[in-house]
Amino acid sequence: RSLHGCWTCRVRRKKCDELHPLCSNCTGLNLSCDGYGPRPAWLDGGVLEKSQAVRIKRIVKQTIKRRSRNLSGPVPFPEISTLPTALPTSSVSSEEDSTSESVVCSTTSGIDIPMSWDPSYNACRSFCRNEAALLMHYLDQAFYSRDRFVAFGSDRLYTQFPFHNSSANGTGRGWLLTLLTGDETIYFATLAFSQYHRDSKFSRKRPSLFENLRPSERVDYYIFALKELQLRLGEAHTWIGSEGMLRSIKALACILQFVFLEVFSSNSSSDWSVHLRAATALLPPLVQTRDHFAIELLLGAFLWLDILAHVSTRAKLSSQFNHEVLLERGNIQLERLFGCKNWAMLLIFKVSQLDNWKRECEENRKLNVAELVRQGVKIEAALNQGLAGILSQNTSQMRTSSNFTPEDQCSAITEVFALAALTYLHVVVSGAHPDQPEINDSVARAMDALGALRDRKLLARVVWPACVTGCMVSEDKQNTFRDLVAVECFAQGVLGTLPQAHEIVEHCWKEREAGAGNCEWFSAVKSIGLHLPL
């Protein structure tokens, strides 16, 4: 054996071919080649080295086993931290991407994450036709639309991040392609999500999560990614330094794909909550990192899902970071991902905290009504101030204009969320009574805002506000609300939780008609068992 081989081959006690920059023995086995430079941090002669040796043996065993079954996984793909940096223009045919240069982003933690790869690198050779098609479907139609200014009639509203604009950061989608193909857990989790998204788009009815699939397709993708993720999370306590940060990024990206798959397929099992809890442990080092758009996107997605899960089902919020601080410090902009401005989501979070405080005080029989009202007045003033700002932009005129920009769309979505927050606040302070003047008023305003949305497909982006509004509609306005949402709820290829929100609303009405005087969306969700982030 050569004394100048890569560090990974030395640990394995295998002969290294000493190819640069990456040893082909490692890449051929889907291993992270640690190269020929300084001694890696994990090579400490102790716990970290033993853990890495176990991990290497497991990956080699899995790769050989998969090959023996003739499965065409993305082998070999190097680790994200070892990919060279140049993007083949044929890989992602987008005007905004083809002009972007190779980029290496440095985080404040000293981590360099390559944003694109070398077209001469032979790792690309292992795509099978179906996986390549699914990967391109994800990049072009499931992650977000290439054209940010596409008309609302398109399917952009059924993407994960409909308001994301990759050209804004100047890197195109090279970083995303690198992330997806640089780690098999993210890769297979993404294929599972992409296949569901593609099947739903072209089916007459929305398929269940694993309906009518060959065993080699979505189920295998999902199960393989899940098993590998579980093994990796079991080693998370050994992740340190820059390498540990990269592993946390990849694990969080994989977990979020699982959660999005559960939400888009409206799977009300508890899996999504298990995934969110698993992600919580990965957050502390990422929260400290600023000015890195990939991390900001992942944290923004987690924030969004965590808060929506809490205000939809009262699922426990993550305690690993301060939601208010992240929403206020400005580097995470939810409107650039989901169309809702930070201030509205921050106030929704504050209403939920007031709700939690009230319920805890009631359980201990120590509720201070004056303090409840005082805090409610503060939040209401902030909501009204934000809504006044939207009104000053003359959004009603923009909704009827042919020039309806993404900024206008964000204002319309934010308005609906803020009005639902106002209704939620009144429910917390006054109780779930639709005939209360303040609830009646905020519901009427929210229904006007929902009705003024230019395209019915926009309802897919405002499911939680629509559910809150619908549950608090007075009896004389129930048919009007049905007319607002029914067509889109049962449209062909609809993705997400809008049909489930409609079911929650109808159940709430029936409960109230039967004499349940204080019924709202939380009690309806619990009653019918639809535990989903709306």
Image (cartoon, rainbow, N blue to C red):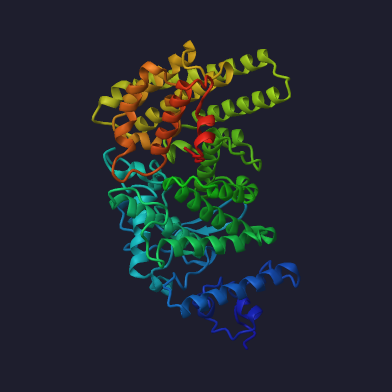
Find residue 322 and report its horizontal and vertical position in percent: 63, 37
Which quarter of the rendering shows the N terminus?
A: bottom right
Which residue sits furthest front?
514
Q: Looking at this view, name the residue that lies furthest to the top.
A: 437
- Outermost residue to the left: 402
Eyeballing the image, is 449 above or below 34? above
Residue found at x 68% / y 27% = 360
Quarter residue 291 falls in: top right
Is residue 69 in view?
A: yes
Total marks placed? 0
The residue shown at (29%, 30%) is 454
Answer yes or no: is residue 20 visible. no
Above or below, 177 against 334 in this view is below
Name the side, left or right, on which 363 lies relative to 84.
right
State the residue lying farthest toward the right.
Answer: 46
Instruction: Give the x, y percent position of residue 293.
Output: 50, 47
Q: Is residue 141 left or right of residue 76?
A: left
Asked if 235 appears above or below 60 in the picture, the reply is above
Look at 57% across and 21% down and name the residue there. Answer: 428
Judge left or right: residue 7 versus residue 68. Answer: right
Name the spot of residue 201 as percent of width and height, x first. Answer: 31, 50
| Residue 221 or residue 73, whichever sits in front | 221
Q: Position of residue 146 (x, y in %)?
A: 32, 49
Nearer the observer, 76 or 331: 76
Side of 105 relative to 1 (left or right):
left
